[in-house]
Each structure stands twice: as structure tokens, then as C-alpha cells.
Image (cartoon, rainbow, N blue to C red):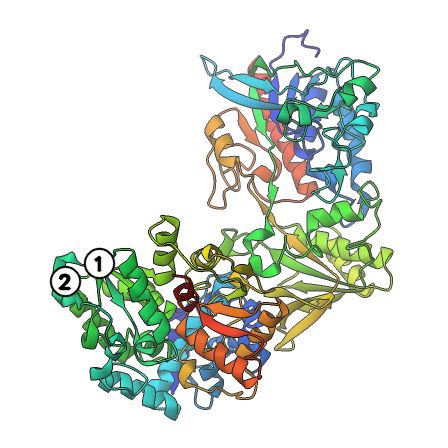
Amino acid sequence: MQIQARQFARQYDLFGCIQCGKCTGGCPMTLKTQLNIRRLIYQTLVARGSFDLLGFEVLWDCTTCSTCTMRCPKDINPMEVIIGMRSALVEGGRVPPTVKTALESVFRQGNPLSFARSDRAAWVGDLPVRRIADLGEEADFLYYVGCTPSYDPRIHPTTRALVDVFDRAGLKFGILGEEEQCCGSEVRRLGESGLFEMLSEDNLALFEELGIHRLVTVSPHCFNVFRNDYPRNGWQLEVQHYTQVVAELIESGRLTFSGELPRRVTYHDPCYLGKHNGIFDPPRAILRHIPGLELVEMERSRERSLCCEGGGGRMWLEGTNREEKLASRRVQEALETGAEILATACPFCVLTLEEAAKLAGLEERIQVREIMQLVAEVL
Amino acid sequence: MDTRDNRPAALIIGGGIAGIQAALDIANAGFPVYLVEREPSIGGRMAQLDKTFPTLDCSSCILTPRMVEAGRHPKIELLTYSEVVSVELIEGETGYHVRVRRKARYVDVERCVGCGLCAEACRMHGRVDSTFDAGVGKRSAIYVPFPQAVPLKYTVDPLACLFLTRGVCGKTFLCKDACSARAIDFEQQDEFLDLEVGAIIVATGFAPFDPREMPEFGYGQYPEVMTGLEFERLVSASGPTAGKIIRNGKEPRQVVFIQCVGSRDAKHGHAYCSRVCCMYTAKQAHLVCEKLPEAQVTIFYMDIRAFGKGFEEFYDRVRREGVLYRRGNPSEIIRRGEKLIVRAEDTLLGEPVEVEADLVVLAVGMQPRADAGQVADLLGLERSDDGFFREAHPKLRPVESGVAGIYLAGCCQGPKDIPDTVAQAKAAAAAAMIRLAGAR
């Protein structure tokens, strides 16, 4: 559990830190836990020799929302510092049991949810979806579904609606089917860098073999890892999040809506779409084009959006404060806008926000919906 | 202008305190000076400030006499509301041919007496954002930027005037009807003026950082969040509230200042310290204490840089007036009910804190003006990594540009306060005069 303090500090540019506290001041976790990244950086800097991270359970609180990294005036990446520290804990075998299960499941079954590899394409059912291997050169892009959208029935409406929309617009696409496996986004963020390297190499080899150059994802987490972490392994992929594709289809007139949805809707920016990748407008463009829909903004939106606590492996981690949930705050913020629907564009956000609404008994007052569920209603 | 003795002239681009100082020094030495200013009046940023640190002199009280002196000087020709459009080296490299565009004011300056009846009559009266008041106050479409303007001549704002934007302004021109001097002339056109000069001083100044680049502070979203420059106008006796600190119709009880907004920030391309914000914030906090003795004043800072003459002493005084300095660089501002909440880590406590505020002042830093690249191209200047104009040598040739006969003064070369600006302007004037004297 030791890190070599000086080497670690050099690797993460910690000598550039001026201890201004901007990272910690905006960290959503400080609303509920003792995580203090500014102090962790200082402790590393002043440590003589090695710095023992044993007992630093707060390292598992970070959701990797990237607020700290976005705002650091010295261009240091505190979020990566936490991931680096988690790596030391993972290497030392000090991993919370739920994380261990998730990581083992990724290793064995290609997904962190402990489902069978062979069931990965069960969501397809009777949909006319083709395997990209059968399409060959014909395919414009790979529809990379991802683990949660493949296995979690609460996300299946979105997974399936996208097939419908792509078909209506005449797009030629294929899926990997049972050959698809985890992108490694959460694996990397949990600090299991060895497993991540393995996954990314396997995936890239598969993409190369199948001649895939362009892919579209359901989850902003998959989108981010392909876009920002994979290129480091020497492969350039054109990666899009589905909201970019669908917004473009609507704006170019290739996708039209026949129904209407006369509801007041607010939109929650997923961290991995917004803060990490600056994609704020395409999801809003989709919502604005839905006939009858009134889009209202929460007090905190876009770059200022509050994290739902689903990132950084937190879908498999309770963290040091189980009682308070940021997702509950977020649902309250959504209620304050007078919205009847809280829309978002990330499977993790859907799950955390839905659970928060349920726990607070607010399901009658506000529904949590993935954007594609709303699109499906007006097709 | 008096050019009888046929001495070579200097051109000064920019009529802020740097340009005014250099113009006066060169003119007092007997050389003719053309002082070109883009705005309708000289005065620049210093005219916008309320009091100056650390002495608390009234900024316009010390500036106005200099402006008037420059305006009346027989050796200075003021070319206000004008822009340099081309600069070419004279054959033999003795100086430059310069073409200046005198923008149409739509007012005959020979006739205008500066009475202001036109502005009173204007249909847009009180409806146009005043640039001088940093958007805090309003004016008419025909205006002088501020009462002490030099020259005290009215100008029609072509972007706000109903006639100039839409081709029609009611049945009759209210401004023309009101003007007993018959000075208003909508037929007026831009004019071009060709000059020959032996030396050029660039004194084009800076732009304040736009905090909309940092959405976490909610500037533009929350009316209670304002910039330091806007606060100067709010607190100024000549400003739109006659110096009353009022926001949303009431006096704030909790005021928070945030230092280093857009300075020392590599993320926003401004790695440098802007050098004035620590002290202007201390001064503004002092003014809050003076005007609102009941108010709680908190300043969030990273480090305090009080390096100038009398600065540390002023910082000592302001703290003892009850201003609370908290170490930490705030990360965001959110609204909770009636109040704004400044979220930060107090790094001395090592704890995240939330501080309530009715008014938040962002100590925005200085950045190069948006057209610095164009000005550089026009004159052949180089820019340093920070975007400001590069001096020929950082230590030994601090006021020369890399181009013979072109000198730098004031914040166009890098952030500085008024004393440093004046010192650099005098040095640039001296350097220019060495060349002008040799050219005879």
C-alpha cells in the first residue's frame, strides 16, 4: 500500500500544486465525506520516502466527476492522483469486497455485473440487429452497447430504442453481440490498471480485426474511455455518444417525430458527457425537438451540474457515507424547477437518480427517464 | 498644433494614463505629438476607477488635470474616436507614414459645446448600457463617456442610435431639435488623416478577464456576482448609484471578494499574476467597511502580494478594519434561497466551507486586448507567451519593442499598476525623444 512519494509526486506533477484548495472546495464528495484531495497531495509532497495509504478508505469515495481537474488553475489532475493512489491499494490487495466481485466478473465474464458472457446480446430479442462481423465493409459504425445497457432491464428501453432510431434513419450499423466485452472505463477508474490494459488491448485487437473505425456508445462512460483513454494505446477511433448522432439526425431532418409529449422536463448533465467531454448541447437539442416538451434548467447545470455518484466505480462501492446520497439532492434540485420528468443520458445516472426518487417516495411527483425513452414515445 | 520649428513628431497609440503621460513629457520637451484614442475621450481605465491604492486618492481627481493639460497643450493634437489603420516605414528609415481613420461622430466638434441637451432628448435616453460604467449604468445613444471627458464633445453611438441602425427615428430627430448649436450631422463620414512621425509609442492597455469563462462562479447568471471593474463604477461617487453600494435594490450585509479570477491560472491561459488585484481588492474591501460599517467582509485569497510602496501597510490597515482574509481559492458559487453560497476549502482549517453572500466581487485579472494580434501585425510587434507585447530585452531594454522607433508603455506590455505604468510611460517618452532628437 506504499507509494514512493517523490516519484509519485513527479509522475503526477504534484510539485506544481500551490495548495489553493480549489479542487477540494468544489469536490461534491466534501458535501458528505472526509475526502480532501488537496490534503492528500500535500501529504504526498511532505512524506519522506514512502507514503502508506493503508486505511485511506476515503480514496474509494471519489466519483471521478472531474470537477477538481476541470478547475485546477495549475493544470494538475487531482482525479488521476486518486486513481493512482487506488492503484496502490489494488496492487496491495486492499480492495472492498464488492469491487473485488465486480473486477473478477469483468475478468471472467467481460462485465462487472456477474452476468454470463453468453447472455450479452439477450436484449436483442426479436429486433432485426445484425452482427458487425456479418456486415463487413457495409457497416458505417459499430453500435457499442456496453455492460449496463446490455444486461440491466431498466436500461433496455434505451438500448432498443436506439436500434429503432438508427433503422428509421437508414443508418448501417452492427453490434458485436456476445463478442462485446467491457470497455474498462470503471476498471481503470477503480485503479485496476493491469486489467484495463488487458481489456483495451483485447478490444482494440477485435476492432482492428473487424475493420472498425467508428463507434457509437450508449453510455458516456464507454464514450469517454474510447475517446480519451484508448488513443494512448496507439489506436485512433472516431467515437460518438448517441446523443450527438441522434441530435444530428433530427437537425438534418432524417429523424422526425409524429407524437407529442406535453411535459415539463429538466435535464441532468452526466459528468462523463458534460464535464469530461464538453457535450452539453446535443442532449438538450434532442429534448427541445420533442413536440410539446418544455425544457427547464436546474439551478446547477452544464459545467456546474452536481454528480449523481455513479462514476469512478461507485456503482459497486458504497463509500464512507452510506446515508446521504448526492442523487437525492439532485432529485430535489430537479423538483425545484417544477419539472415532471428528470431526463438524463447516462445509464448510471438513470439508475442512481431513479433509486433516489424511489427512496424519497417522489416517484409520483417526478419520473426519471433516459432521453431515448422520451424519444421512443414520440416516434 | 504648433509645428513651426519643424521638429519630428511622435505618435502615441492609446490615450490612457500611459499615453497621456508620454504625450505630455514629449510635448513639454518641444516635440509635436499626435495622441490617437479609439474612444470618444482620453482617460482610459484610470478614469473608470474610484479611488487608487494605497493612498486612496480619488482617481479622476488626479487624472483629470492631466487630461485637460493634454487636451490644451499646443504641441499635442488629440485624435480621439480615431484608429491607426496603416503604418509604413519611411524610405531611409527615419520614421513612419501613418494613416489614421477619424470615425464619424455625427457631431461637428467645432460647433458642439458639450451642453448635453441632445442626450437628454434622445429617444434611447437611459436605455443604452454605458461602456464606461462597465454595464452597471445606462446612457443615451448620443453621449460623452463621462462628465470630465476630454474633449467634451458628444458622439453618436452607431450601434445604439435608432436612425443609424434602422434608418428612422420617429417623425423628427429629437437630438437635432434639442441642439441649439446645430452641431449634429448625420451626413458626416469617416475621414482619413496621413501623418509622418519619427517615433511611435504603443500604449493600448489591457482588457479585464471575462469571468464567463469560469461558469462555476455564475457570473452573468447571478446579478449579485460582479467584477472588480464593475464594483469600481458601483462604488464611485460619479457612478450610476452615486457611490451607494446597492445590489438588487438593497445594501449587501455579507460581501465576499474572490482573488485571482483569471490570474495565475494556466487553465484559462493566464499563468501570470496580474499584480494589481490583491491591492485593488484590499482597497475595495476598505470602501465597503467605510460605506457599510455593519457589513461582514470576507476575502478569499491564495497568497497576498503587497510588494509596492505602502502596500503591506495598507494590507495591515484593511485587516484591522475587520476584513476577514480566508486562505483558499473558491471553487463555485451556488444560490440557496435568497443568498449566494461561496463554496471553498479554507486551507488553513483544512475544511470545506460555505460562506453566505449578498454580493460577490470577482477580482478579475488583466489580459491582452482582443485586438492585440491585429495591433501587433499592424506594427510588426512580437508578443510574449502571455499574449502581451514583447519588449526588446526583459531587463535592459524594457520599453523598446523589437521594431526600431516603436516603444511600449503601460499594460499592453504586461499587467502593472498606475505608478509602474507612469514610470514606464516616462521611460518610453525618454527613449522616443532620444530618437527624435537624433533625427533632426
The amino acid on which the numbered mark 2 sits, given as a three-letter code, is: Leu
- Provide the chain ID for the residue under circle 1: A
Packing grade of label 2 (10 A; few <14, some 14-19, many >=20) is some
Which residue: 70% across, 43% down? B135
Which residue: 13% across, 67% down? A133
Which mark, residue A135?
2
Answer whether labels 2 and 1 touch (C-beta < 8 Å).
yes
The quarter of the image holding the C terminus of chain A is bottom left
Packing grade of label 1 (10 A; few <14, some 14-19, many >=20) is some
- Location of residue B224 by image quarter: bottom right
Residue A152, image x, y percentages:
35, 80
* SS for callout 2: helix
Residue B12, image x, y percentages:
61, 25
* SS for callout 1: loop
User: Does residue A248 lie above or below A64 as drawn?
Assistant: above
Left or right, A125 with reference to A291: left
Residue A297, image x, y percentages:
57, 61
Which mark, residue A172?
1
The amino acid on which the numbered mark 1 sits, given as a three-letter code, is: Lys
